[in-house]
Amino acid sequence: QVQLVESGGGLVQPGGSLRLSCAGSGSIFSSNVMGWYRQAPGKQRERVATITTGGSTTYADSLKDRATISRDNAKNTVYLQMNSVKPEDTAVYYCNLVDLLHGYSYWGQGTQVTVSS
């Protein structure tokens, strides 16, 4: 079993920055993809960014200029840095890990990010 714990959410002013962290623990296979997704009220969950253990990244087109995903494989931790945040970035942000060998997908409990003055 894998556990994912997000941290770093909260209230952010428009134009500011946020940095989220997600620490994984448990039976984490070495070949995996970690990522960030978000879900705003009344909307479907959407992908923000993903990163493989080798460092290959993908970004949502609408966020690639403002978001940076990174990871520390030794710590099984993934980070999301987002700059110039906007009120529409308000959402619950979820961490995800996909075990590429077994095809399992795990989710964190989510962390609330609110962008407001």
Image (cartoon, rainbow, N blue to C red):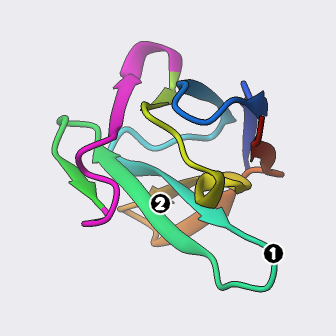
> What secondary structure is found at the residue carrying circle 2?
strand
User: Between disc 2 and disc 1, whose residue precedes?
Assistant: 1
Answer few, some or many: residues within 10 Å of disc 1's Cα (few below 14, many 20 plus, some between 14 and 19): few
Q: Nearer the viewer, mark 2 or mark 1?
A: 1
Whole-percent x, y for residue 41 in the image: 81, 75
- Gap in Å between the C-alphas at discs 2 and 1? 25 Å
Which amino acid type is shown beneath numbered disc 1? Answer: Pro
Whole-percent x, y for residue 16 in the image: 55, 25
Which amino acid type is shown beneath numbered disc 2? Answer: Val
Any magenta on residue 66?
Answer: yes
Q: As drawn, is 27 to the left or to the right of 60?
A: right
* Residue at x 78%, y 44% (from the top left corner): 114
Q: Which residue corresponds to mark 1?
A: 41
> What secondary structure is found at the residue carrying circle 1?
loop
Whole-percent x, y for residue 57 in the image: 21, 47
| Span of residues in magenta | 60-75
Quadrant of residue 101 within the rendered picture: bottom left
> Contact, CB < 8 Å: mark 2 with mark 1?
no
* Residue at x 38%, y 26% (from the top left corner): 71
67, above or below 109, in the image: above
Q: Which residue corresponds to mark 2?
A: 98
